[in-house]
Amino acid sequence: AISRPLRLAHLAFHEGAFERVGSDWRIDQKRIEAVLIAIEGIIGAGKTTLAKRLAKEWSANLLLERFEDNPYLAPFYSDPTGFALPLELSFAAQRSQQWAEACRSLGQEEHLISDFHFEKSLVFASVTLEKKAMPPFEQFSKNLFGDLQSPDIIILLQPEPERALENICHRARGMEVDIPLSYLHDLSAAYFQWVKELRGSKVLELSYSSNYVPWEEYGI
């Protein structure tokens, strides 16, 4: 269990109450047996890097998205229109299964840091799918996500899309090399809309430009 305050911007884990104290959120570990944190953001935002750092710093369980297991991802980048629907359907099923299994295996007073939220497919689908395909996809997702436990906290990384594209080019995953900047701008807008409509989780938004990485200020 976490027994000392660990701050990330306005976020604090502290023996106390799950309430706002000044600019901090404090979590009563007697009332909340497990703390679930999901890190989200556009492609290249730094989600996995931050998740690994936080899990190590806080001795928490780490859940990483297995995107490489999705057989539709590489074909989608070659033919977005043809493979958008099977990609998002398979990702929605995969992410919900990963999240459910991780939550079931979480011990009392253990904490989980994930580099994705199980609703991520709804964000991407709002950009990649045709408008007429969204209502049935949303209904499918609602049925799929119905019994899943929501994260206590979501950390939303909001880099400028230009910075995210620099990160993508730097890590040089073959299938991502031709991602257009306009796609990242569309995803950024979709995340903004998703967070605005989100219920049930505290949200910490971290914005940064090409010259600033937000968590470095906090020694993480």
Image: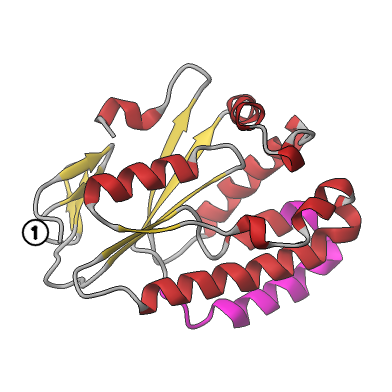
On screen, residue 81 above or below 215? below
Magenta-span inclusion, residue 210: no
* Amino acid at dot 1: Gly
Magenta-span inclusion, residue 132: yes
What element does badge 1 sit on?
loop
Which of the two residues, 24 or 74, is positioned nearer the viewer here?
74
Q: Position of residue 140 (x, y in %)?
A: 69, 78
**Quarter where residue 165 is shown:** top right
Which residue was labeled with disc 1?
Answer: 16
In the visual, does 87 lie left or right of 41? right
Q: Quarter of the image containing the N terminus?
A: bottom left
Q: Quarter of the image containing the C terminus?
A: top left
**Quarter where residue 131 is shown:** bottom right
Query: Residue placed at 69% from the left, 37% from the top?
Result: 184
Q: Position of residue 51 (x, y in %)?
A: 40, 47
For the stretch drawn in magenta, what is the main secondary structure? helix
**In the image, farthest residue toward the top:** 211
The magenta-colored residue range is 126-149
In the visual, does 7 lie left or right of 150? left
Which coloring applies here?
A: secondary structure
Query: Residue placed at 13% from the left, 61% from the top?
Result: 17
In the visual, does 88 lie left or right of 194? right
Which of the two residues, 42 or 60, is positioned nearer the viewer here?
60
Query: Residue placed at 38% from the left, 74% from the top?
Result: 103
On screen, residue 82 above or below 98? above
Task: Sort mark 1 into few (<14), some (14-19) or many (20+) by Cα contacts within 10 Å.
Answer: some
Q: Position of residue 41 (x, y in %)?
A: 54, 45
